[in-house]
């Protein structure tokens, strides 16, 4: 059975894309069949894995086919990455999708319908969400079995989470009764700062009782910052560092939760 995980947080720069890539490649390294979906018109996942940004066939094309009820090959958009994962790419043309969806019947479920055509071929599908709570993110949450929430341990982190969790609750009630919270993942953590400890504790105090918080946190490292422009995961770029080690440990926690 395929598990679909949306990686979401309406805040930009909290390591959604970095986590999607490295959790995805990590899962594939232990033998899982993995598909990554770029659901952000910024196309960072697509470019971060070394693919060009002007591709003709993308997630947008696939979703348009669903909307128009056309017969189409759902695999046409799939790209194969050298580290063993498959990718559905996006680029800035996806930014029109929120508007196109506006008049569509069942507009929350277009991505879900598309992924249903692919899910038999994969053990995990990870959706890299855009930094907003618009229609594309709602589509991702409607399609997902669970949502993984990367959080940078900053002062206002607990506040931003409240808004996201409200949306998750709404989706759970209206469109996707099976949606679960995979967990909160602390990312870009500078744990030697007292502030970081305090901010993580604030999130634990506010949500730890009801929501799983991953034991593993992802440290801020130079190598993880650099991989964004290298077209590969941290496992290829710098396998011996603590960035790779921490994503490896996250993979184990996600597997244990399956
Ligand atoms: N653990 C980390 N340490 C250092 N830099 C990181 C780390 N995780 C992500 N980054 C960098 O921070 C920036 C934002 O990360 P990204 O994954 O693109 O966030 P998002 O998708 O949430 O906007 C990128 O330049 C990325 O390379
Ligand atoms: Mg991103």
Image: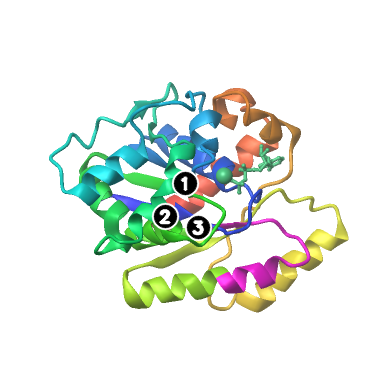
Q: Mark 1 sits on what residue?
A: 95
Q: Is residue 116 visible?
A: no
Left/right placement of residue 172 relative to residue 133 reads left
The answer to which image quadrant residue 170 occupies is bottom left
Residue 205 inside the magenta-drawn segment: no
Magenta range is: 149-163
* Residue 219 left/right relative to 167: right
Q: What residue would you read off at disc 3?
A: 148
Q: Position of residue 56 (x, y in %)?
A: 36, 27
Task: Give the quarter of the figure containing the C terminus.
Answer: bottom left
Crowding at mark 1 (Cα within 10 Å: few <14, some 14-19, many 20+): some
Residue placed most toward the observer, 53 or 12: 53
How many other residues sit within 10 Å of disc 2, few (<14), some (14-19) or many (≥20)?
some
Drawn side of residue 126 relative to residue 120, left or right: right
**Circle on res. 98:** 2
Label 3 residue SS: strand
- Seen from the viewer's position, the closer of residues 163 and 246 is 163
CB contact under 8 Å: marks 2 and 1 = yes
């Amino acid at each position: 059975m395929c598990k679909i995980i949306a990686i979401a947080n309406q805040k930009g720069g909290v390591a959604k894309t970095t986590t999607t890539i490295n959790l995805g490649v990590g899962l594939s390294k232990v033998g899982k069949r993995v598909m990554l979906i770029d659901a952000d018109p910024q196309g960072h996942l697509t470019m971060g894995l070394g693919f060009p940004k002007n591709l003709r066939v993308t997630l947008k094309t696939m979703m348009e086919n669903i909307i128009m009820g056309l017969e189409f090959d759902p695999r046409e958009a799939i790209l194969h990455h050298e580290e063993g994962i498959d990718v559905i790419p996006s680029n800035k043309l996806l930014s029109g999708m929120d508007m196109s969806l506006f008049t569509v019947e069942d507009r929350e479920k277009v991505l879900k319908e598309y992924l249903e055509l692919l899910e038999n071929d994969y053990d995990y599908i990870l959706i890299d969400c855009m930094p907003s709570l618009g229609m594309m993110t709602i589509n991702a949450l409607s399609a997902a079995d669970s949502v993984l929430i990367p959080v940078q341990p900053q002062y206002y982190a607990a506040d931003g989470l409240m808004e996201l969790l409200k949306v998750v609750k709404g989706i759970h009630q209206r469109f996707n009764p099976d949606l679960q919270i995979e967990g909160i993942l602390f990312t870009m953590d500078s744990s030697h700062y007292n502030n970081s400890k305090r901010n993580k504790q604030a999130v634990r105090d506010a949500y730890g009782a009801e929501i799983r918080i991953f034991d593993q946190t992802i440290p801020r490292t130079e190598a993880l910052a650099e991989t964004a422009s290298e077209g590969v995961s941290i496992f290829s770029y710098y396998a011996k560092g603590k960035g790779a080690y921490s994503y490896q440990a996250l993979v184990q926690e996600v597997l244990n939760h399956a």
